[in-house]
Image (spheres, rainbow, N blue to C red):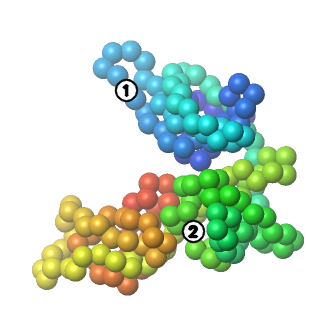
Amino acid sequence: MQLNAPSIRQGMILEIDNHLWRVMKTQHVTPGKGVACMQVEIRNIETGNKSNKRFNSTERVERVVLNQRTMQYLYQDGDDYHFMDMENYDQITLRADMLENALAYLLPEMEVMVEFHDERPLNVQLPQSVTLTVTECDASIKGQTATGSYKPGKLETGASIMVPPYLEAGTKVRINTESGEYIERA
């Protein structure tokens, strides 16, 4: 499936020069002079090599069509993460490097979409937002309200996040899984 370069998003699988690449980071660059482009950091699925590629905004790239299955995350065993198919109860194991962006939000029993290419798991898609508990953050100061300032906090998965100053440890919050930003209290 062909798509325009500005439509490239983190986590997509692209086919470039007959190799499959996972998009790790994207940045839309608009120079003062010239054509806008997409700066993309990609990782080769076979070799694990990283590369940076720049696409003009008018270029089209080949997105690999993947089959999606709903799976439940079961547990972690070292660098291996185990998932179970919700329809036929088959289990698969994915390496930590395949879940790089998802690890910060993954909790046991969470349902995710696992994407397959020719029956080979390649990618995990998280829901748009997840609800997690803030385990650590600085104490709130009396009278502090929702302002533009944020303080560092730590989620139950170990990920760091910036939270509003009035939040306390133990509060459940909704997190945007694409940007990693705080959305609201849950």
How far is disc 2 from disc 1 in space, using C-alphas? 34 Å
Q: Is residue 167 left or right of residue 18?
A: left
Contact between marks 2 and 1 (CB within 8 A): the answer is: no
Q: Residue at x 24, y 64 (%)?
A: 150
> Would you name the residue on which mark 1 appears?
30
- Residue 82 position in % (x across, y down): 72, 69
- Does residue 127 lie above or below 5 as drawn? below
Q: Secondary structure at mark 1?
A: loop
Kindly tell me whether residue 163 is visible in this rendering. yes
> Would you name the residue on which mark 2 appears?
106
Q: Is residue 112 left or right of residue 170?
A: right
Residue 107: image tag:
none
Q: In the image, what residue type sits under mark 2?
A: Leu
Q: Residues within 10 Å of mark 1 (few under 14, many from 20)?
A: few
Mark positioned earlier in the residue sequence (2 or 1): 1
- Residue 6 position in % (x across, y down): 52, 33
Q: Residue at x 24, y 76 (%)?
A: 138
